Amino acid sequence: MSAVLEKNLELNGQVDEVYQFIADPASWALWPSTGKVPGIVSASGRVVQGEYVKFKTTDGSEHEHFVAELIPTQRIRLQLKKVGLPLALFIAEIQDCFDFEPTETGTRMRRRFEIRFRSNVIAETIGRALFTQHFSQALDAHHSRLVEKFSK
């Protein structure tokens, strides 16, 4: 069982500028901690299809994103398959997909964030409400930082 969060974001930057920013692991530290969901402290690696990007979070845990799909200036799809503790107790996989589309004023970024839980029992009792709420707040916080970045 899984939970899906979808968000659309209008940014003032041009598509290639927004895409390059998201595709740069050094920019991932923009992802803030929201209490229940840790922020990203650092990331290393290259966003190249078939490779892994390692990152460390504010709670000290370490994770790896697999770059599952990459279409320059159009799409980045990451899979968090090697989930660190404590998330590994509940979550089997997270997919984070960014789609970029030019608009008259900049870029529309469509983000689809899917959490696949380890079991239906966990998904029903803990996952659906709790994780969806906390990850939704985390995505909103990250998106606020992106809007600030591209409003200058």
Image (tube, rainbow, N blue to C red):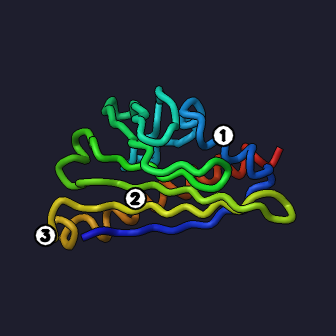
Quarter holding residue 25 = top right
- Whichever of labels 2 and 1 marks the residue nearer the N terminus, that label is 1
Q: Is residue 150 above or below residue 1?
A: above
What percent of the width, then of the height, locates residue 69? 48, 51
Q: Going 79% across and 49% down the picture, which residue do you hit?
A: 13
Between 95 and 143, the residue placed more toward the observer is 95
Query: Within 10 angstroms of label 1, few (less than 14), some, or many (20 or more) residues?
Result: some
> Which amino acid type is marked by label 1?
Phe
To which residue does mark 2 refer?
134
Image-quadrant location for residue 54: top left
2 or 3: tag closer to the N-terminus: 3
Q: Position of residue 152 (x, y in %)?
A: 83, 43
Secondary structure, mark 2, is helix
Q: Which residue is mark 3?
A: 121
> Is 149 displayed left or right of 67 in the figure?
right
Give how far across and how far down residue 44 sits, in percent: 47, 26
Q: Position of residue 104 (x, y in %)?
A: 86, 65
Mark 3 residue element: helix
State yes or no: discs 2 and 3 in contact (Cβ < 8 Å): no
Residue type, numbered disc 2: His
Pick the front one: 70 or 126:
70
* Residue 65, placed above or below residue 60: below
Count of picture labels: 3
Q: Which residue is mark 1?
A: 21
First in sequence: mark 3 or mark 1? 1
Question: Which amino acid type is shown beneath numbered disc 3?
Answer: Val
